Amino acid sequence: MQVQREWDRVYRALAAPRPYGTAELRRRLLQLSARIFTDPAWGADRPSTGWAELRHQVRLEGRKAGRHG
């Protein structure tokens, strides 16, 4: 779940108005996406289903901690 939290952080940074270091942020987002999609725990049979579940869990964790996202 740490990789998904990092993915969310990088995505938000890239989506910000006038982000700094867009090329680096894009590369990092691709690296993190590849890690998520190739992780056997989340991408076994249907990677998109596993990723959706992972994102859901991270969002629930954020809400419980009082964060939005």
Image: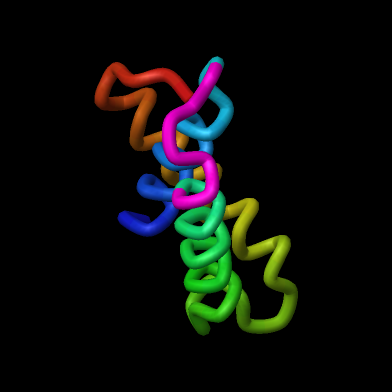
Please identify the quadrant where the N terminus is shown. bottom left
**Residue 20's quadrant in the figure?**
top left
Image coordinates for residue 33, horizontal then vertical, percent: 56, 63
**Residue 64's quadrant in the figure?**
top left
Q: Residue at position x 33%, y 20% from top?
A: 67
Q: Residue at position x 31%, y 55% from top?
A: 2
Image coordinates for residue 36, horizontal then vertical, percent: 52, 67
Taking 10 as reference, is 64 left or right?
left
Query: Is 23 within the magenta?
Result: yes
Q: Considering depth in this image, is 59 or 28 the residue closer to the camera? A: 28
Q: Residue at position x 72%, y 62% from top?
A: 48
Give above or below for 69 relative to 14: above
Give above or below for 46 relative to 60: below
Image coordinates for residue 60, horizontal then vertical, percent: 43, 34
Query: Total marks drawn?
Result: 0
Report the span colored magenta: 18-24
Q: Residue at position x 38%, y 24% from top?
A: 63
Taking 1 as reference, is 18 left or right?
right
Query: Is 14 within the magenta?
Result: no
Taking 11 as reference, is 66 left or right?
left
**Residue 62's quadrant in the figure?**
top left
Image coordinates for residue 5, horizontal then vertical, percent: 38, 46
